Image (cartoon, grey):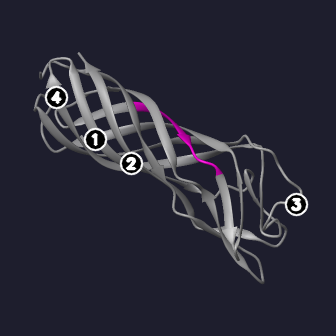
Amino acid sequence: ASAQQWELGVVGGFAYSPSMTVRNATTSASTGLKSGGAIGVYAGEDMYRYLSGEANYLFRTGDFKVEGGGRSATMAAHTHIITGDILAHFRPKGARIRPFISFGGGVEVLQGTGQESANQPLGNLVALTATREVLPVGEAGVGVKIQMSKHLRLRVQVRDYISQAPNDVIAPARGASIGGLRQDIVGMGALALTW
């Protein structure tokens, strides 16, 4: 097992995004992305005894939303997340069970795919738009790898993708602003081939 250097896997899971606050001088509402599924792929290499590196792609479903004062609006949307990550393991390369922490960064592409409306509820605060926005993203996570057989690895992990609040796909109205950072907290399971 210690000679296995490469890992190629598929992931699936569920993403949750805490709401952000959009406010103007007189009122406020919550906005962000609805929870949704996530699927992706990754490729990695065990470079050192306790460190490995990998490249990740994640496709995350979840509509844009705004809610407040008993009114709400949504727009169909999805997100692409591409990161490069370092994994620091608590057990050495070759161990059957390897807990790890991960950290890294990259970009996320938020894409509104629904129909825009000039009469959108809460339009005095924010407009949900059928546009694309690219944001830098940081990542931190925790997980465990389990070597099931010589060439099959199971992984369970939770990753938190953190970026600035969007201003194009969820566009604040004149005099309004979105506060806080945007997060995607994703719980995932993965199966990988190793060699």
Q: Give the range drawn in magenta.
A: 55-63
Placement of the N terminus among the 4 image quadrants = top left
Which residue position is annotated with label 4?
147
Q: Earlier in the sequence, mark 3 or mark 2?
A: 3
Q: How many marks?
A: 4
The amino acid type found where label 2 is placed reads Arg
Question: In the image, what residue type sits under mark 1?
Answer: Val
Measured Cα–Cα span from mark 4 to mark 1: 12 Å
Q: In which quarter of the image is residue 145?
A: top left
In the picture, the disc for residue 156 is 1
Quick one: 105 or 130, which is closer to the camera?
Answer: 130
3 or 1: tag closer to the N-terminus: 3
- Left or right: 195 with respect to 61? left
Q: Which of marks 2 and 4 is nearer the N terminus?
A: 4
Q: Count residues near mark 1 (Cα–Cα under 10 Å), then give few for <14, some for 14-19, many for 20+.
A: some
Q: Could you tell me which residue is drawn at 22 percent across and 21 percent down?
A: 152
The CA distance from mark 3 to mark 1 is 43 Å
> Tags 3 and 2 in contact by the CB under 8 Å rule?
no
User: Residue 113, percent across and down?
Assistant: 73, 40
| Residue 119: mark in rendering | 3
Q: Quote the CA–CA distance across marks 2 and 4.
A: 20 Å
Q: Give the image location of residue 195, x and y in percent.
A: 23, 15
Magenta stretch, main secondary structure, is: strand
Question: Can see residue 188?
Answer: yes
